[in-house]
Image: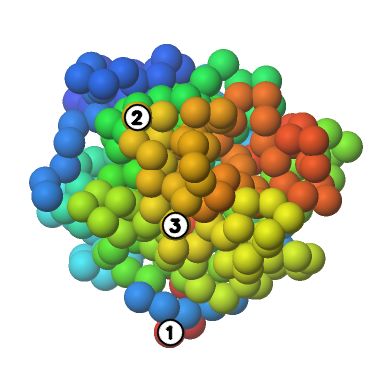
Amino acid sequence: GTHLVLLPALVAMLLLCVSPAPAKQGSSCLSAPAEKRCSQQVPLAVEHPVRSSISSIRTAAPQQPASTFSSTGFPADCSHLTSSSPSGVYVIQPAASPPRAVWCDMDTEGKGWTVVQRNTYTTEITWKESWTTYKYGFGNVQGDHWLGTEYLHLLTQQGTYKVRFVVRSNANVTHYAEYDIFSVESEASGYPLRLGRFLGGGEDYLTSYHTRYGGIHDNMKFSTTDRDQDQHSGNCANSYGGWWYDKCQNVLLNGKRYIFWPGICSSGDCASSLILVKPTDVC
């Protein structure tokens, strides 16, 4: 069975790290860290109830080879939890990263998804944050949040990962786009997005070029209000928030009162979004 242990020594730190207030530059509780390709499609994600207490922070007893756990005993990502573990807040530690509090999605078929972004249309988060704030993450892992661009880089550099971008319309219809490869490269290269083969249903808006919208997202560098790396004459991030823009966006999940997916939420009125990652199944 699953052995879940509370982490009292980390409670003070994690209370800050999962606090609802976005982290500000220079005051983040998330300490700066030191300075790949495969596939299988799985069904739709589901929404999870919020756990209201810090006492829900857990770590699973090792059920995987030792190489999948850090020297401190934390798993490298949520895929290493036992299948009977519930969804909730856990501590993981990707290679070369400090321990991180994350939401592990154990309800979506396939289990073991690490949630790296969650947003709701009515969010309190502005999403118009600085490069440094995006780098180390902000928000509440039990609700709307961004894991941190640096931690996305470290997480996806330790193996081959896939990704699922999920949106739910205001009519409660869920749509997703899955890619069998997902990685974010280094800060020095601009945190560019690398995606593999499209596995979702419908139109591919991230790796295909769409002149009607914003071009493409695959291979684009990350842009924020204070670091413009898009291909537009202005700074796309000034309108909504940090994202992998080209000539702005085909899809956009990081926005306050604006979550956009053509054909699903064409007015930017999606009710919610999620970005889920886990190691690929077949190499």
Q: Is residue 245 visible?
A: no
How far apart, in angstroms, are the residues tagged by discs 3 and 2?
17 Å
Q: Residue at x 52, y 20 (%)?
A: 126
Q: Residue at x 62, y 51 (%)?
A: 214
Q: Gap in Å between the C-alphas at discs 1 and 2?
A: 38 Å
Q: Earlier in the sequence, mark 3 or mark 2?
A: 3
Figure quadrant of the N terminus: bottom left
Residue 99, placed above or below residue 11: below
- Spot occupied by residue 69 in the image (x, y as percentages of width and height): 24, 58
Hey, what amino acid is under mark 3? Met
Residue assigned mark 2: 226
User: Residue 9's image quarter?
Assistant: top left
Q: Is residue 242 visible?
A: yes
Amino acid at dot 2:
Asp
* Horizontal and vertical percent position of residue 14: 30, 25
Count residues near mark 2 (Cα–Cα under 10 Å), then give few for <14, some for 14-19, many for 20+.
some
Nearer the camera: disc 1 or disc 3: 3
Task: Identify the residue position indicated by label 3 in the image.
Answer: 220
**What is the image's colouring?**
rainbow
Label 1: which residue? 283
On the image, which quarter does residue 144 sit in?
A: top right
Residue farthest along the front direction in this orientation? 233
Secondary structure of the residue carrying numbered label 3 = loop
Q: Secondary structure at mark 1?
A: loop
Q: Give the amino acid type for the residue marked by disc 1 in the picture.
A: Cys
1 vs 2, front mark: 2
Mark closest to the chain's N terminus, 1 or 3: 3
For disc 3, the neighbor class at 10 Å (few under 14, some 14 to 19, many from 20) is many
Mark number displayed over residue 175: none
Q: CA distance from mark 1 to mark 3?
A: 25 Å
Q: Quadrant of residue 208?
A: bottom right
Image position, residue 177 (x, y; %): 66, 60
